[in-house]
Amino acid sequence: MKTYLTVLRIADYRKLWIGAVVSLLGDGASWTALAWLGVSRGGAEALTVLGVCYTAPIIVGGLLAGKLVDRFSRRNLLVLDSVVRGGAMAAIPILALTGSLQLWHAYVVAAVYGLFKILPIGIVPAVLPELVPEDKLPTAIAMEAIATGAAGLIGPAIGGALIPLVGVQGVLAIDAASYLAFALFVLSMKAKLPRPVADAGSGAKRGSWGPVLAFLRGDRVMVVITVAFTAFNVAMGMLIVTQPWLAHEKLAGGATMLGLLVGVLAGAEMLGSLIAGAIKPAVRPMVRIGSLQLVAGGGLLLLLGANPVLVLIGQVVCGAPAALLTVSSQTVRYKRTPEELRARTMTLMRTLMLGAVPVGSVIAGPLLAAGQYSGMVVLMAVIAGAPGLLSLLIVPSAVVNRPEVAAAAAA
């Protein structure tokens, strides 16, 4: 705990972290609200469309963000993202007040969310080395994951509890306010977070994907991480659709149950992040990453039968190892990536990984609508866990940092 408090004493990092937690709390509540709106008005088919709209635009957003993150002030980009997504969320309560809210409005709002989501996902981890000392970087990485997990635990529960009281529109109004809060926290930071200064001899043209792709092609560890996490996120896309379907069709409790399902998974991820920030980095991190991915995938098999207790346990068994392997992989990615390529590399890798989520939504929705719940669960577990074998069989001896790889990429 002392390690975490030491990092939080750094004023600019504390402001960024608290602002991110507030915004992520709103995001957790808003997804619960949008998902409930979708499943209530359109069933599994609407959930499929909503899941795709919520996640697929991140692919386009990531490609565009790669052109922006190294050309403009990261602080200005974070504020821009907050203004745009906050405005989109505010549109739902405004439409509800005028009596003109329709289901397709939720699809549009979800698409705007997905389009801009990659900006903070790519920028926040890229600026951590500018805000904290190098020896505190693993803790700062874990804190980012903890913020996501804590907000994901509380946010959906807040959303599920508030929907019966203030409706979907009220929850989304709260999310809009959370975006404003994040923008204010970022603007209060002393660090200006300017665009990075490229090494004169690196040849890393600002905004170009070429140097990033060349770097990734030359590092098998980075390739394995990208492939394994992309597959895992396909499974997470399936789970995103499965949770509201279970709450509406199989389990008692309605919107409150949906908040519980999403919150328990996020709580397990937060627990895993806390553990990851407290333990020593592995000497051979890819062995740890691969083993944890196999365990996480296996946990999803507990969803078979739709028993509420086993469903919750399965999400814990999946979520905690998933967070552990995520923090471990982020440490590897930071250490192996040249500083002038870091923002673009993080943006590209996370775009590929998160861009896989809508694929899972497209797979799960039709299977659920066709009554193939058990088959869908087995497929989800295999997709989540099996790629862990890549880490164990292809790069088990890899270490965290290989300076010769970074030097070759910058040459």
Image: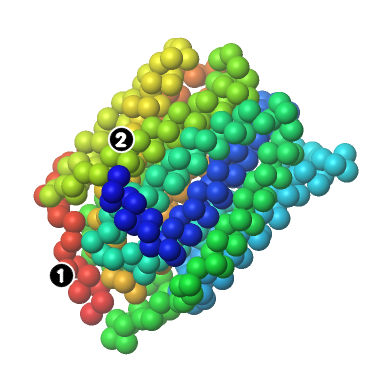
- Tell me the crowding category of disc 2: few under 14, some 14 to 19, or many 20 or more residues within 10 angstroms, Cα based: many
Question: In front: 103, or 180?
Answer: 180
**Secondary structure beneath disc 2?**
helix
Question: In front: 281, or 64?
Answer: 281
Left or right: 52 with respect to 388?
right
Residue 47's x, y, as percent?
62, 32
Look at the image and name its color scheme. Answer: rainbow
Question: In front: 156, or 371?
Answer: 156
Q: Is residue 48 visible?
A: no
Q: Is residue 136 visible?
A: yes
Residue lying at 44% horizontally and 65% vertically, measured from the top left: 12
Q: Foreground mark, 2 or 1?
A: 2
Residue at numbered disc 2: 321
Report the Cα–Cα distance between label 2 and label 1: 31 Å
**Secondary structure beneath disc 1?**
helix
Left or right: 342 with respect to 38?
left
Q: Quadrant of the C terminus?
A: bottom left
Residue 390's image quarter? top left
Question: In front: 344, or 173?
Answer: 173
Residue 228's image quarter? top left
Left or right: 257 with respect to 88?
left
Residue 161's x, y, as percent?
63, 28
The tag earlier along the polypeptide, 2 or 1, is: 2
- Find out whether the residues at labels 2 and 1 contact each other: C-beta distance under 8 Å: no
Q: As shown in the figure, which amino acid type bears the numbered disc 2? A: Pro
Residue lying at 67% horizontally and 50% vertically, measured from the top left: 176
Residue lying at 21% horizontally and 44% vertically, measured from the top left: 279
Residue lying at 76% horizontally and 49% vertically, measured from the top left: 91
Residue at numbered disc 1: 404
Residue at far bottom of view:
200
Q: As shown in the figure, which amino acid type bears the numbered disc 1? A: Glu
